[in-house]
Amino acid sequence: MKKIKKTKSISILGIIVCLLGVILFGTRTIAPEIFGNNTSSEVNTVNVENLENVIIKTGETITEDFISNNNTSLKTYFLNVGQADSILIQNNEKNMLIDAGNNEDGEMLVNNLKQLNVEKIDYLIGTHPHEDHIGGMDNIINNFEIGTIYMPNVQTNTKTFEDVLDAVSNKNLKIETPKVNDTFLLGEANCKILSVTDDEDNLNQSSIVIQLNFKDLSYLFMGDAEKEIEESIDVGKVNILKVGHHGSDTSSSLDFINKIAPEVSIISVGKDNSYGHPSDDVIKRLENIGSKVYRTDEVGNIFIEQN
Protein backbone atom coordinates (compact mmCIF):
# COMPACT_ATOMS: atom_id res chain seq x y z
CA MET A 1 0.00 0.00 0.00
CA LYS A 2 1.41 3.36 -0.99
CA LYS A 3 2.08 5.63 1.96
CA ILE A 4 0.62 9.14 1.95
CA LYS A 5 2.77 11.93 3.30
CA LYS A 6 1.13 15.09 4.60
CA THR A 7 3.23 18.17 4.16
CA LYS A 8 2.93 21.85 4.81
CA SER A 9 3.95 24.86 2.74
CA ILE A 10 7.72 25.18 2.69
CA SER A 11 9.46 28.47 2.16
CA ILE A 12 11.87 29.02 -0.76
CA LEU A 13 14.70 29.08 1.77
CA GLY A 14 13.48 25.75 3.16
CA ILE A 15 13.49 24.21 -0.33
CA ILE A 16 17.03 25.43 -0.93
CA VAL A 17 18.12 23.95 2.40
CA CYS A 18 16.54 20.62 1.49
CA LEU A 19 18.19 20.56 -1.96
CA LEU A 20 21.57 21.39 -0.46
CA GLY A 21 21.06 18.59 2.06
CA VAL A 22 20.37 16.11 -0.73
CA ILE A 23 23.42 17.24 -2.67
CA LEU A 24 25.73 17.09 0.34
CA PHE A 25 24.38 14.11 2.25
CA GLY A 26 22.16 12.09 -0.10
CA THR A 27 18.47 11.36 0.33
CA ARG A 28 17.37 11.57 3.96
CA THR A 29 14.10 11.78 5.85
CA ILE A 30 12.94 15.38 6.20
CA ALA A 31 13.00 16.37 9.84
CA PRO A 32 9.85 17.91 11.32
CA GLU A 33 11.74 21.12 12.04
CA ILE A 34 11.79 21.93 8.28
CA PHE A 35 8.06 22.61 8.41
CA GLY A 36 8.42 25.40 10.94
CA ASN A 37 7.70 25.68 14.65
CA ASN A 38 4.97 23.51 16.14
CA THR A 39 1.82 25.18 17.35
CA SER A 40 -1.25 23.58 18.86
CA SER A 41 -2.83 23.45 15.38
CA GLU A 42 0.12 21.94 13.53
CA VAL A 43 0.94 18.28 13.07
CA ASN A 44 4.16 17.37 11.31
CA THR A 45 4.36 14.08 9.43
CA VAL A 46 7.47 12.16 8.44
CA ASN A 47 8.02 8.83 6.70
CA VAL A 48 11.05 6.94 7.96
CA GLU A 49 12.69 5.84 4.73
CA ASN A 50 14.64 2.92 6.16
CA LEU A 51 11.64 1.54 8.10
CA GLU A 52 9.00 0.24 5.71
CA ASN A 53 5.39 1.23 6.45
CA VAL A 54 6.29 3.47 9.41
CA ILE A 55 4.99 7.01 9.70
CA ILE A 56 5.77 9.48 12.49
CA LYS A 57 3.67 12.47 13.47
CA THR A 58 4.54 15.14 16.01
CA GLY A 59 2.55 17.98 17.52
CA GLU A 60 2.04 19.99 20.67
CA THR A 61 -1.51 18.74 21.30
CA ILE A 62 -3.42 15.55 20.56
CA THR A 63 -5.74 16.37 17.66
CA GLU A 64 -7.83 14.29 15.25
CA ASP A 65 -4.72 14.03 13.05
CA PHE A 66 -3.28 11.65 15.66
CA ILE A 67 -6.27 9.30 15.47
CA SER A 68 -5.95 6.28 13.20
CA ASN A 69 -8.91 4.03 12.50
CA ASN A 70 -6.64 1.24 11.26
CA ASN A 71 -7.04 -1.32 14.03
CA THR A 72 -4.55 -3.72 12.43
CA SER A 73 -1.67 -1.23 12.60
CA LEU A 74 0.53 -0.80 15.67
CA LYS A 75 0.05 2.67 17.11
CA THR A 76 2.47 4.07 19.68
CA TYR A 77 1.95 7.44 21.33
CA PHE A 78 4.77 9.01 23.30
CA LEU A 79 2.69 11.52 25.21
CA ASN A 80 4.28 14.82 26.15
CA VAL A 81 4.26 14.87 29.95
CA GLY A 82 7.34 17.04 30.39
CA GLN A 83 10.06 15.59 32.62
CA ALA A 84 8.25 12.26 32.88
CA ASP A 85 7.11 9.25 30.85
CA SER A 86 3.80 8.06 29.44
CA ILE A 87 3.41 5.79 26.42
CA LEU A 88 0.19 4.43 24.92
CA ILE A 89 0.41 1.43 22.58
CA GLN A 90 -2.57 0.12 20.59
CA ASN A 91 -3.22 -2.85 18.32
CA ASN A 92 -6.43 -4.67 17.42
CA GLU A 93 -8.43 -2.55 19.90
CA LYS A 94 -6.12 -3.55 22.77
CA ASN A 95 -4.37 -0.87 24.81
CA MET A 96 -1.22 -0.80 26.91
CA LEU A 97 -0.17 2.26 28.91
CA ILE A 98 3.43 2.35 30.09
CA ASP A 99 3.75 4.92 32.89
CA ALA A 100 1.47 7.88 33.60
CA GLY A 101 3.54 11.02 34.03
CA ASN A 102 3.66 13.27 37.09
CA ASN A 103 0.82 13.93 39.52
CA GLU A 104 -0.27 17.05 37.66
CA ASP A 105 -0.45 15.12 34.36
CA GLY A 106 -3.25 12.77 35.44
CA GLU A 107 -6.23 14.79 34.23
CA MET A 108 -4.54 15.67 30.93
CA LEU A 109 -3.70 12.01 30.30
CA VAL A 110 -7.27 10.95 30.98
CA ASN A 111 -8.53 13.53 28.48
CA ASN A 112 -5.96 12.54 25.86
CA LEU A 113 -6.76 8.84 26.17
CA LYS A 114 -10.48 9.51 25.86
CA GLN A 115 -9.81 11.60 22.76
CA LEU A 116 -7.95 8.58 21.37
CA ASN A 117 -11.09 6.49 21.98
CA VAL A 118 -9.60 4.47 24.82
CA GLU A 119 -12.16 2.84 27.11
CA LYS A 120 -10.10 0.02 28.62
CA ILE A 121 -6.42 -0.26 29.51
CA ASP A 122 -5.65 -3.94 28.99
CA TYR A 123 -2.14 -3.59 30.42
CA LEU A 124 -1.23 -0.77 32.79
CA ILE A 125 2.47 -0.72 33.58
CA GLY A 126 4.22 1.41 36.16
CA THR A 127 7.84 0.77 35.25
CA HIS A 128 9.01 1.84 38.74
CA PRO A 129 7.53 3.85 41.63
CA HIS A 130 9.05 7.27 40.95
CA GLU A 131 6.52 10.10 40.85
CA ASP A 132 7.35 11.03 37.24
CA HIS A 133 6.27 7.55 36.11
CA ILE A 134 3.26 6.72 38.34
CA GLY A 135 2.01 10.22 39.23
CA GLY A 136 -1.13 9.99 37.10
CA MET A 137 -1.79 6.26 37.55
CA ASP A 138 -4.51 6.81 40.14
CA ASN A 139 -6.35 9.06 37.66
CA ILE A 140 -6.04 6.38 34.97
CA ILE A 141 -7.29 3.64 37.29
CA ASN A 142 -10.23 5.77 38.45
CA ASN A 143 -11.37 6.67 34.94
CA PHE A 144 -10.90 3.53 32.84
CA GLU A 145 -11.61 -0.16 32.94
CA ILE A 146 -8.32 -1.80 33.86
CA GLY A 147 -7.05 -5.27 32.96
CA THR A 148 -3.59 -6.31 34.21
CA ILE A 149 -1.44 -3.98 36.31
CA TYR A 150 2.31 -4.63 36.30
CA MET A 151 4.76 -2.96 38.70
CA PRO A 152 8.06 -4.11 40.23
CA ASN A 153 7.99 -5.56 43.72
CA VAL A 154 9.31 -2.43 45.43
CA GLN A 155 7.49 0.10 47.58
CA THR A 156 7.93 3.68 48.69
CA ASN A 157 6.28 5.70 51.45
CA THR A 158 5.37 8.59 49.14
CA LYS A 159 1.83 9.91 48.86
CA THR A 160 2.04 9.30 45.11
CA PHE A 161 2.62 5.59 45.66
CA GLU A 162 -0.09 5.43 48.32
CA ASP A 163 -2.57 7.12 45.96
CA VAL A 164 -1.92 4.38 43.39
CA LEU A 165 -2.44 1.66 46.01
CA ASP A 166 -5.69 3.30 47.15
CA ALA A 167 -7.00 3.49 43.58
CA VAL A 168 -6.12 -0.19 43.03
CA SER A 169 -7.83 -1.18 46.27
CA ASN A 170 -10.95 0.89 45.62
CA LYS A 171 -11.59 -0.96 42.35
CA ASN A 172 -10.75 -4.37 43.80
CA LEU A 173 -7.78 -4.74 41.46
CA LYS A 174 -4.37 -6.19 42.19
CA ILE A 175 -0.81 -5.40 41.20
CA GLU A 176 1.25 -8.16 39.63
CA THR A 177 5.03 -8.31 39.28
CA PRO A 178 6.15 -9.99 36.06
CA LYS A 179 9.25 -12.14 35.76
CA VAL A 180 12.10 -11.83 33.30
CA ASN A 181 11.25 -13.63 30.03
CA ASP A 182 7.49 -13.49 30.72
CA THR A 183 5.59 -12.84 27.48
CA PHE A 184 2.12 -11.57 26.63
CA LEU A 185 0.22 -10.43 23.58
CA LEU A 186 -1.15 -6.96 22.88
CA GLY A 187 -3.35 -7.75 19.91
CA GLU A 188 -0.85 -9.24 17.48
CA ALA A 189 2.17 -7.59 19.10
CA ASN A 190 4.46 -9.85 21.13
CA CYS A 191 5.69 -8.33 24.39
CA LYS A 192 8.54 -9.72 26.49
CA ILE A 193 9.83 -8.66 29.90
CA LEU A 194 13.59 -8.19 29.66
CA SER A 195 14.24 -6.83 33.15
CA VAL A 196 12.53 -6.20 36.47
CA THR A 197 14.25 -6.16 39.87
CA ASP A 198 13.45 -5.41 43.50
CA ASP A 199 16.26 -2.86 43.89
CA GLU A 200 14.96 -0.46 46.56
CA ASP A 201 18.29 1.39 46.81
CA ASN A 202 18.09 2.55 43.20
CA LEU A 203 14.51 2.48 41.97
CA ASN A 204 15.62 3.24 38.41
CA GLN A 205 17.25 -0.19 38.32
CA SER A 206 13.95 -1.82 39.26
CA SER A 207 12.39 -0.56 36.01
CA ILE A 208 10.31 -2.98 33.99
CA VAL A 209 12.00 -3.16 30.58
CA ILE A 210 9.80 -4.35 27.72
CA GLN A 211 10.66 -5.47 24.21
CA LEU A 212 7.77 -5.45 21.74
CA ASN A 213 7.88 -7.15 18.36
CA PHE A 214 5.31 -6.43 15.68
CA LYS A 215 5.66 -7.90 12.19
CA ASP A 216 9.34 -7.38 11.36
CA LEU A 217 10.12 -4.47 13.69
CA SER A 218 11.32 -4.39 17.29
CA TYR A 219 10.57 -1.74 19.93
CA LEU A 220 12.39 -1.35 23.26
CA PHE A 221 10.96 0.54 26.24
CA MET A 222 13.69 1.10 28.82
CA GLY A 223 11.89 2.97 31.62
CA ASP A 224 14.68 4.54 33.69
CA ALA A 225 16.95 1.48 33.57
CA GLU A 226 20.63 2.34 33.79
CA LYS A 227 23.85 0.91 32.34
CA GLU A 228 24.04 -2.07 34.71
CA ILE A 229 20.65 -3.25 33.45
CA GLU A 230 21.66 -2.61 29.85
CA GLU A 231 24.57 -5.00 30.33
CA SER A 232 22.32 -7.70 31.77
CA ILE A 233 19.42 -7.80 29.32
CA ASP A 234 19.32 -10.18 26.38
CA VAL A 235 18.49 -8.00 23.41
CA GLY A 236 19.84 -7.58 19.92
CA LYS A 237 18.96 -5.21 17.10
CA VAL A 238 16.14 -2.75 17.88
CA ASN A 239 14.35 -0.48 15.41
CA ILE A 240 12.59 1.97 17.73
CA LEU A 241 13.96 2.85 21.17
CA LYS A 242 12.41 4.67 24.09
CA VAL A 243 15.66 6.00 25.48
CA GLY A 244 16.29 5.13 29.12
CA HIS A 245 16.06 7.68 31.95
CA HIS A 246 15.12 10.70 29.83
CA GLY A 247 18.45 10.61 27.98
CA SER A 248 20.56 10.73 31.15
CA ASP A 249 24.20 9.67 30.89
CA THR A 250 23.46 7.05 33.56
CA SER A 251 21.91 5.10 30.67
CA SER A 252 22.48 4.54 26.95
CA SER A 253 26.11 3.43 27.13
CA LEU A 254 28.16 3.47 23.95
CA ASP A 255 28.31 -0.33 23.82
CA PHE A 256 24.56 -0.64 24.33
CA ILE A 257 23.63 1.90 21.66
CA ASN A 258 26.04 0.35 19.17
CA LYS A 259 24.59 -3.09 19.95
CA ILE A 260 20.90 -2.27 19.49
CA ALA A 261 21.43 0.38 16.75
CA PRO A 262 17.92 1.91 16.67
CA GLU A 263 16.79 3.76 13.55
CA VAL A 264 14.50 5.94 15.69
CA SER A 265 15.12 7.06 19.29
CA ILE A 266 12.51 8.77 21.45
CA ILE A 267 13.46 10.86 24.47
CA SER A 268 10.70 11.90 26.88
CA VAL A 269 12.03 14.99 28.62
CA GLY A 270 10.94 18.37 29.96
CA LYS A 271 12.04 21.72 28.59
CA ASP A 272 14.89 23.38 30.49
CA ASN A 273 14.79 20.68 33.17
CA SER A 274 17.12 21.02 36.16
CA TYR A 275 18.76 17.62 35.53
CA GLY A 276 20.41 18.62 32.29
CA HIS A 277 18.59 15.83 30.40
CA PRO A 278 19.23 14.70 27.78
CA SER A 279 23.01 14.30 27.92
CA ASP A 280 24.94 15.69 24.96
CA ASP A 281 27.01 12.50 24.98
CA VAL A 282 23.90 10.34 24.64
CA ILE A 283 22.60 12.45 21.76
CA LYS A 284 25.96 12.13 19.99
CA ARG A 285 26.02 8.35 20.46
CA LEU A 286 22.59 8.08 18.86
CA GLU A 287 23.35 10.47 16.01
CA ASN A 288 26.69 8.79 15.31
CA ILE A 289 24.94 5.53 14.44
CA GLY A 290 22.45 7.41 12.26
CA SER A 291 19.50 7.21 14.64
CA LYS A 292 16.80 9.84 14.15
CA VAL A 293 16.21 11.42 17.58
CA TYR A 294 12.82 12.82 18.58
CA ARG A 295 12.45 14.73 21.87
CA THR A 296 9.16 15.64 23.51
CA ASP A 297 10.64 18.94 24.71
CA GLU A 298 11.22 19.91 21.08
CA VAL A 299 8.32 18.40 19.12
CA GLY A 300 5.64 17.66 21.73
CA ASN A 301 3.65 14.45 21.37
CA ILE A 302 5.12 11.77 19.12
CA PHE A 303 2.91 9.27 17.26
CA ILE A 304 4.42 6.29 15.45
CA GLU A 305 2.20 4.08 13.30
CA GLN A 306 3.42 0.84 11.77
CA ASN A 307 1.05 -0.45 9.09
Image: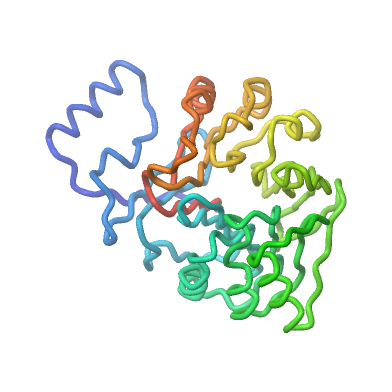
- Which of these two is toward me, 145 or 228? 228
Give the left or right position of residue 131, taking residue 31 as reference.
Answer: right
Give the left or right position of residue 298, taking residue 193 as reference.
Answer: left
- Which of these two is toward me, 228 or 181? 228
- The quarter holding residue 63 reads bottom left
- The quarter holding residue 233 reads top right
* Colouring convention used in this rendered image of the protein: rainbow
Can you name the residue that lies furthest to the front here? 157
From the top left corner, tell me how far across and down residue 145 is, in percent.
67, 80
Residue at (67% x, 49% y) in the render: 214
Give the left or right position of residue 302, taking residue 20 as reference.
Answer: right
Can you name the residue that lies furthest to the left here? 12
Residue at (72% x, 62% y) in the render: 157
Residue at (70% x, 69% y) in the render: 162
Q: Does residue 54 sit above or below 70 in this rendering? A: above
From the top left corner, tell me how far across and down residue 133 is, in percent.
61, 56
- The quarter holding residue 23 reads top left
Residue at (43% x, 54% y) in the render: 301
Q: Does residue 119 sit above or below 63 in this rendering? A: below
From the top left corner, tell me how far across and down residue 144 is, in percent.
62, 79
Regarding residue 278, the answer to whether it shows in the image is: yes
Regarding residue 220, the answer to whether it shows in the image is: no
From the top left corner, tell me how far across and down residue 142 is, in percent.
62, 80
Count the numbered circles shown: 0
